[in-house]
Amino acid sequence: MKATIIISIYKNTRALKAVLDSLKKQTEQDFELILSEDGNDKQMADFIQRYDFPWVMQHLTQEDKGWRKELALNRAVMAAKNDWLIFIDGDCVLHPKFVEWHCRYRQRGVMLAGKRIKLSPELSERCINGEQLLLWPYLFCHRGCRYIEEAFYCGLAQWIRRPVKHLVGSNMSMSREDLIAINGFDENYILPATGEDYDIEWRMQAMGCKIVSLRNLAVQYHLYHKENWQDHEINSIYCTQQQKMNKYICDNGIRKI
């Protein structure tokens, strides 16, 4: 297998079905799948039991005690059977060439970074119902969509690279060995944002890894949902403290130091 795809999930089975359906349409199918659930929801378990998976698949659960996504991700990293890890979220539908591009440029010392368009409620519902978003020019004039320029796939982007300044946790990939070298995700992050992407970014860069852009190659469509959080100042303060100490190998990660 060329990669392990890790999907972070939490309760939303309608969105997850759309994501899994988009995985079935990938031009690259040589991967295993890990569903990393930050909880243990019966409706989710029933859905997964019924869904027809064409890939080797693991479903990992844990007790729902609030935000513990970093713990769930570390458990998925250790369960992966492949060295190349592709991270996506259970509410992000994929362009058919998404996996292919994440596999094509995989190598040690590199973090592959894509972006995503945030769809409006109307287009999200149409996407969930199976409509293809690949050639919708009216995205440009459709109210409610954000980051529209990220929606369009262009193979020429491999030569005309639009840079990516920061990782997005739902569209990134890296070597399992590199991730384990920084002790994985830092489980001291207790709120969404920062911990599952920016923190990984600066720590892996401190170790010598570099970001390689997959903008307009690994295209991703984020389904609309209401944000369940507003402030992540606690995460930002903690991250700044770790950076000042250049502590790129975290204490509370895969290993408890």
Image (tube, helix red, strand yellow):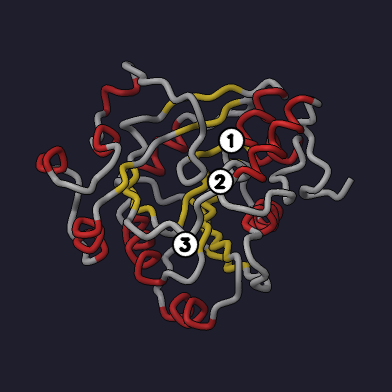
Q: Which is closer to the viewer, label 1 or label 3?
A: 1
The picture places residue 73, in percent across and down from the top left corner, at: 64, 54
The image's mark for residue 193 is: 2
Vertical position of residue 31 compared to residue 216: above or below: below
Residue hosting label 3: 55
What residue sits 66% from the left and 45% below the top? Answer: 234
Mark 1 nearby-residue class (10 Å; few <14, some 14–19, many ≥20) = some
Of residues 107 and 18, the one drawn nearer to the viewer in this rendering:
18
Q: Is residue 70 left or right of residue 155?
A: right
* Amino acid residing under circle 3: Trp
In the figure, is residue 250 to the left or right of 152?
Answer: right
| Mark with earlier residue (1, 2) | 2
Percent coordinates x, y for residue 72 in the rendering: 65, 59
Which badge, 2 or 3, is on the more N-terminal residue?
3
| Amino acid identity at mark 2 | Ala
Label 3 neighbour load within 10 Å: few <14, some 14-19, many 20+: some
Residue 229, disc = none
**Residue in front for this viewpoint, 67 or 43:** 67
Q: Residue 198 has which mark?
A: 1
Do residues under tags 1 and 2 come within 8 Å of each other at their CB atoms? Answer: yes
Which numbered disc, 1 or 3, marks the residue that appears first in the sequence? 3
